[in-house]
Amino acid sequence: MNAAKKPRPQYVFEVVSTERVSPHLMRVHLAGSGFDAFAATAAERGSTDAYVKLLFAKPELDLEPPYDLDALRERLSPEDMPSRRTYTVRAIDRESRTIAIDFVVHGDEGIAGPWAANAAPGDRLCMSDPAGKYAPDPAVDEHLFLGDDAAIPAIAAAIESLPSEAVGRALIEVGSPSDEIAISAPAGVDIRWLHRDGAPYGSALVAAVEALDRPTGSVDVFAHGEREAMKRLRPVLHTEWGIERARLSLSAYWAAGRAEDTFQAEKRQPVGQIFDDEQTAARA
Ligand SMILES: Cc1cc2nc3c(=O)[nH]c(=O)nc-3n(C[C@H](O)[C@H](O)[C@H](O)COP(=O)(O)OP(=O)(O)OC[C@H]3O[C@@H](n4cnc5c(N)ncnc54)[C@H](O)[C@@H]3O)c2cc1C
């Protein structure tokens, strides 16, 4: 059977305000008439790593969001289609009826980072409904959170969801001490910031994980960030430490030198896979 694929719902939000959380992290607060449906879907999913696909249309094409992607595909060349970028929903504030997304400001390259750096009240942002896969397992002895700047929103949301008696460690790699941010954590969760200081992405994180002792009790791991770093963490976490796949949320959030379109397409090739047997199909 060839059932037609149902298009994912889209939400059009407007920027309410922006906030520099650190020199390289811009928080964008957004509101829109779809807030209730969006918040309900996120609550239904119950994951702390809720993420959305943002749709960026070329300004010169003057397209009106939400985008009828099937219709646009008929009349636009592939390079003129809206570009997709994946971002974590950092917070949903039911009182102010806003959502927050934290964007890494990584320079002039790309679409989403530069958009966030220049975002102003009234700017519109079109996105899919939230998906997500991970929530900390309350039954484990210890939680381990590993990542870089792009994973800060998902790691922070997970840590903030933990009960007060939770025990864990977070190792987060950022550019320099000025990129550290406040995360409200239970007393038993230790947050360690690692600084790249100009070294390649992920090198400080991988070295710090390699130097750790294997956790003694049951553990669940949330590890996300630059692709090569995640590939290097796999043998440590899975092979050496023996952490089973079900307890391991390990994936690449981005790849150095690749725009997201290429990064997603490469998930179908060995270079884009973290586990050798991965059959990850990039989501349309
Ligand atoms: C499930 C999921 C959740 C994510 N959540 C977040 C989030 O909450 N916040 C966030 O900032 N990112 C997040 N990311 C990563 C984000 O999707 C990518 O960083 C994306 O490539 C950024 O798009 P762009 O248009 O700014 O740059 P692109 O056009 O994709 O890339 C342009 C250039 O910038 C480089 N680049 C991209 N991202 C970074 C980076 N973080 N640091 C340094 N160089 C970079 C690329 O390698 C490329 O050379 C998430 C990814 C996934 C899969």
Image (cartoon, rainbow, N blue to C red):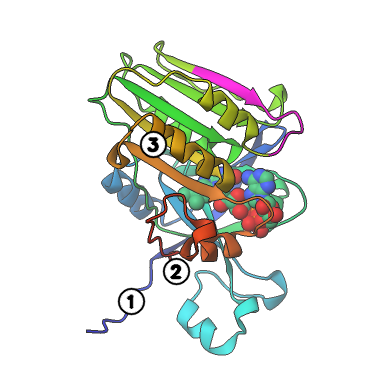
Q: Does the magenta stretch include residue 197?
A: yes
What amino acid type should be assigned to the residue bearing mark 3? Thr
- The tag on residue 5 is 1
Disc 3 target residue: 239
Give the class, few, some or many, for how many residues have Cα within 10 Å of label 2's Cα (few <14, many ≥20).
few
- Which is nearer the N-term, disc 3 or disc 2? 3
Residue 175, placed above or below residue 116: above
Left or right? Give the position of 39 relative to 213: left
Residue 73, placed above or below residue 49: below
Residue 93: x %, y % from top left: 43, 37
Residue 253: x %, y % from top left: 53, 48
What amino acid type should be assigned to the residue bearing mark 2? Ala
Give the class, few, some or many, for how many residues have Cα within 10 Å of label 1's Cα (few <14, many ≥20).
few
- Judging depth in this view, the residue of 128 and 280 nearest the camera is 280
Q: In which quarter of the image is residue 225?
A: top right
Question: CB of mark 1 within 8 Å of CB of mark 2?
Answer: yes
Question: CB of mark 3 within 8 Å of CB of mark 1?
Answer: no
Disc 2 target residue: 284
